[in-house]
Image (spheres, rainbow, N blue to C red):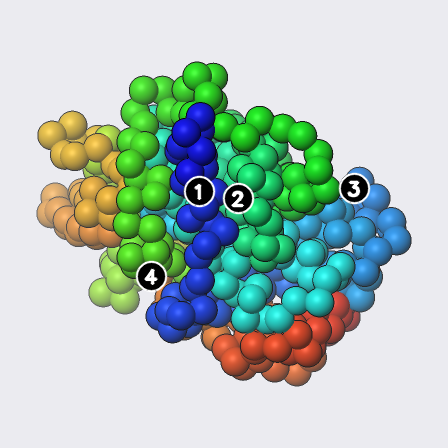
């Protein structure tokens, strides 16, 4: 029942606790694909040098039953949630959701998998709670408006804490009151600045959000106190983070009709770099197939709607990690090589042959266009190319490219090793507690040793 003293928080909490995604086959199917995609990213990310640094720093040698994805080790659930969240996001290859303007799965699934080490949980219950956590995260994103992101917050981190807490509260069947406290505890830990894009700290945002969400739900159900009105309080979430752009009706209006994982749905990345750079990546690959040569190009101009390149904080990257956030580099690599690979975005210095073309690119904004928002129809990029012979080429991409099936991506990310080969088919059909245990066992293998 909605509390008269905190109607928004109460209604939000009640929507979370009463949700039943198991009845929606479209939502469940979409969730299973997203989990396969996340696991591909996390297994590949487990091999990253910085993931190893994090494992050592967070004390992953603590005793516990929670798995580290892509490792034969087990550890404390809170430590596991940090590491697995980081591994899923470190390559910037994981999914994105327009309503969040960030990456939900790499926060929510690590928290749920960590809990699965402590409780007897069915696989379908975990999938359902993931859907609910994503719904909460997306609804909160819609309610904040665009200024939260544009002012410098990284929504994966700030909204992810609440999304993870919502998923855990749903899975553990917390009461409405417990859920409200859990969400408030998560909200007080919401943090993460976009100034970290291109740095190791950016994927750490996902890990710390997963841990904070899991910890918040555990504290609340244990009786730990906290404010139960984080959406209603005069100094609550929106007064701090929305900058006057809030739309509070979006919190619960149309909840689950359809689920946010169905519409607008997730974008499963085809390229291992920032989502906002993907349209120019696709255009670059297309122009490569058409035979355009880099030495024929004098100048490249990208035109975005206002705010659409806010995440693309690098123009002249020095290494592949920075290059994930540079449309100039992404377009150059796509045009010259005809594809984008993980080795385009590793920690090595950028290749001179690619940066030479990137230096000929620049950006502008179409101030007459609608400002970039959670509505996918506000996203576009126009590429104008001036050629050395005096002619020009123009291409336009509306929306975002993405994968409909991550199975091949999973095979590539895991080195096509048979040790991981059964995971996609298992995730597509898993329902029981035994199925989830089998998945955890398959994930609890050393990704580096299993490479061919």
| Residue 262 disc label | 4
Q: Which numbered mark, 1 or 2, is in the foreground of this view?
A: 1
Asked if the residue under mark 2 is in contact with the one under mark 1, i.e. CB atoms within 8 Å, the reply is yes
- Looking at the rendered image, the quarter that the N terminus falls into is top left
Number of numbered discs overlaid on the protein picture: 4
Rounded to the nearest angstrom, the CA distance separating label 2 from label 3 is: 32 Å
Residues at marks 3 and 1, CA–CA distance in whole angstroms: 40 Å
Residue 135 shows in this picture: yes
Mark 3 element type: loop
Q: Compared to 204, does 152 lie above or below?
A: above
Which residue is rendered at x = 40% and y = 70% of the image?
A: 23
Which comes before the other along the chain, label 2 or label 3? 3
Element class at badge 4 = helix
Q: Residue at x 66, y 67 (%)?
A: 121
**In the rendered view, would you say 220 is above or below 334?**
above
Q: Using a 10 Å C-alpha cutoff, classify the residue at mark 3 as few (fewer than 14 neighbours), some (14 to 19) or many (20 or more).
A: some
* Disc 4 packing (10 Å; few <14; some 14–19; many ≥20): some
Say whether residue 31 is left or right of residue 331: right
Give the numbered dot on residue 176.
Answer: 2
Residue topped by disc 1: 1
Q: Residue at x 35, y 40 (%)?
A: 251
Q: Position of residue 165 (x, y in %)?
A: 57, 44
Q: Nearer the viewer, residue 377 or 198?
A: 377
Q: Quadrant of residue 321?
A: top right
**Whole-percent x and y of residue 422?**
61, 82
Assign a secondary structure to mark 2. helix
Q: Disc 2 vs disc 3: Cβ atoms closer than 8 Å? A: no
Q: Residue at x 36, y 20 (%)?
A: 243
Q: Are marks 2 and 4 in contact (CB under 8 Å)?
A: no
Mark seen at residue 58? 3
């Amino acid at each position: 029942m909605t509390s008269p003293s905190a109607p928004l928080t109460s209604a939000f909490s009640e929507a979370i606790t009463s949700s039943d995604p198991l009845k929606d086959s479209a939502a469940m199917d979409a969730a299973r694909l997203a989990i396969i995609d996340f696991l591909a990213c996390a297994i590949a990310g487990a091999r990253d040098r910085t993931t190893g640094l994090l494992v050592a720093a967070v004390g992953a040698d603590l005793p516990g039953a929670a798995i580290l994805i892509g490792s034969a080790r087990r550890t404390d659930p809170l430590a596991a949630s940090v590491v697995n969240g980081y591994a899923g996001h470190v390559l910037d290859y994981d999914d994105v959701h327009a309503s969040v303007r960030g990456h939900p799965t790499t926060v929510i699934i690590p928290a749920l998998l960590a809990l699965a080490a402590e409780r007897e949980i069915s696989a379908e219950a975990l999938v359902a709670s993931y859907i609910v956590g994503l719904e909460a995260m997306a609804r909160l994103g819609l309610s904040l408006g665009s200024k939260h992101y544009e002012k410098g917050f990284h929504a994966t981190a700030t909204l992810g804490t609440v999304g993870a807490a919502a998923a855990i509260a749903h899975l553990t069947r917390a009461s409405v009151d417990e859920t409200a406290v859990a969400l408030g505890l998560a909200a007080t830990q919401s943090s993460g600045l976009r100034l970290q894009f291109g740095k190791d700290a950016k994927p750490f945002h996902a890990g710390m959000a997963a841990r904070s969400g899991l910890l918040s739900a555990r504290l609340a159900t244990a009786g730990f106190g906290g404010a139960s009105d984080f959406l209603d309080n005069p100094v609550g979430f929106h007064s701090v983070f929305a900058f006057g752009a809030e739309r509070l009706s979006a919190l619960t209006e149309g909840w689950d009709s359809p689920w946010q994982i169905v519409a607008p749905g997730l974008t499963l990345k085809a390229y291992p770099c920032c989502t906002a750079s993907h349209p120019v990546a696709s255009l670059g690959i297309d122009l490569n197939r058409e035979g355009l040569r880099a030495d024929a190009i004098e100048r490249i101009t990208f035109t975005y709607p206002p705010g659409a390149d806010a995440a693309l904080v690098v123009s002249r990257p020095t290494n592949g990690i920075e290059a994930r956030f540079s449309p100039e580099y992404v377009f150059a690599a796509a045009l010259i090589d005809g594809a984008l690979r993980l080795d385009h975005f590793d920690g090595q210095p950028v290749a001179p042959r690619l940066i030479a073309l990137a230096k000929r690119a620049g950006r502008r904004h179409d101030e007459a266009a609608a400002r970039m928002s959670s509505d996918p129809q506000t996203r576009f990029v126009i590429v104008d190319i001036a050629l050395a012979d005096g002619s020009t080429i123009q291409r336009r991409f509306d929306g975002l490219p993405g994968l409909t099936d991550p199975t091949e991506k999973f095979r590539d990310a895991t080195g096509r090793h048979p040790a991981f080969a059964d995971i996609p088919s298992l995730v597509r059909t898993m329902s029981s507690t035994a199925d989830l245990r089998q998945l955890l066992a398959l994930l609890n293998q050393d990704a580096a040793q299993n490479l061919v």
